[in-house]
């Protein structure tokens, strides 16, 4: 091999190595690319895309047919801004767009809906599914504060039994706090 061929191959392979290193740094280190994903959408307040589970296409659908319909919006966000957390956890806001973030949320409208897809309208949704006052969330059995607030009730000034039980509960609570406090010796 002559000298020119050696230089050519050396430069060629060096360029390939540089391109591979730059690409690796961009995508794996800096995570400088966009992720487009479906995120939960509230049909009561937002124009959402509608997805209906089809057992023939999806294989398995929830047993309750009311759960076959789900609502979503499309989020486009930089990969380096997405939190690494389990999306099934309540406190995971991986796809939430906060002010100042390089992030875009697409709601369902005439321009964004693809053929064969449907959009939800908040007004229509609320007419078909009126919110009920009885849908208050039940307390988690481990959430003592929530359970205590549920049990709290205001006593009528004439109700001596209620007032006595409140006073007894207060005294028990105070005694427990005193038992737990360190001695002032």
Image: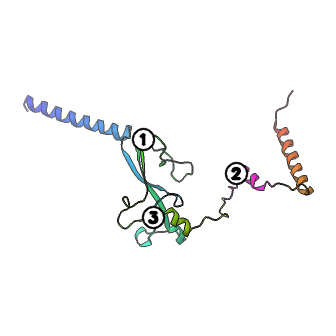
Q: Which residues are magenta?
A: 137-153
**Badge 3: how crowded within 10 Å, few (<14), some, or many (20+)?**
some
Upstream in sequence: badge 1 or badge 3 = 3
Q: Dot 3 corresponds to which residue?
A: 50
Q: Dot 1 corresponds to which residue?
A: 80
Q: Residue 147: horizontal and vertical position, in percent?
A: 74, 54
Q: Where is residue 23, by image quadrant? A: top left
Quadrant (top left, top right, bottom left, bottom right) of the C terminus: top right
Which of discs 1 and 3 lies nearer the camera? The answer is: 3
User: Foreground residue, 159 or 121?
Assistant: 121
Q: Secondary structure at mark 3?
A: strand
The label shown at residue 106 is none
Horizontal side, residue 83 vs residue 34: left or right: right
Q: Residue at x 39, y 65 (%)?
A: 117
Q: Residue at x 53, y 54 (%)?
A: 88
Does 122 sit above or below residue 100? below
Circles 2 and 3 in contact, beta carbons < 8 Å: no
Does 164 sit above or below residue 70? above
Q: Residue 6: horizontal and vertical position, in percent?
A: 12, 31
Q: Residue at x 86, y 46 (%)?
A: 170
Q: Secondary structure at mark 2?
A: loop
Res. 7 visible in picture = yes
Q: Residue 19: horizontal and vertical position, in percent?
A: 25, 37
Q: Secondary structure at mark 1?
A: helix
Q: Residue 35: horizontal and vertical position, in percent?
A: 39, 48
Q: How many marks?
A: 3
């Amino acid at each position: 091999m002559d000298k020119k061929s050696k230089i050519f191959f050396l430069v060629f392979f060096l360029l390939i190595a540089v391109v591979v290193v730059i690409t690796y740094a961009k995508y794996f280190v800096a995570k400088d690319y966009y992720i487009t994903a479906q995120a939960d959408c509230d049909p009561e307040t937002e124009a959402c895309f509608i997805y209906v589970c089809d057992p023939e296409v999806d294989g398995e659908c929830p047993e309750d047919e009311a759960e076959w319909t789900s609502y979503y919006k499309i989020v486009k966000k930089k990969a380096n801004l997405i939190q690494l957390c389990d999306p099934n956890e309540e406190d995971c806001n991986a796809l939430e767009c906060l002010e100042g973030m390089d992030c875009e949320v697409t709601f369902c409208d005439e321009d964004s809906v693809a053929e064969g897809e449907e959009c939800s309208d908040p007004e229509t949704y609320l007419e078909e599914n009126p919110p009920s006052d009885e849908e208050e969330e039940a307390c988690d059995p481990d959430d003592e504060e929530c359970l205590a607030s549920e049990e709290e009730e205001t006593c009528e000034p004439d109700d001596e039994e209620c007032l006595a039980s409140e006073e007894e509960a207060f005294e028990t609570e105070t005694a427990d706090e005193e038992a737990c406090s360190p001695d002032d010796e």
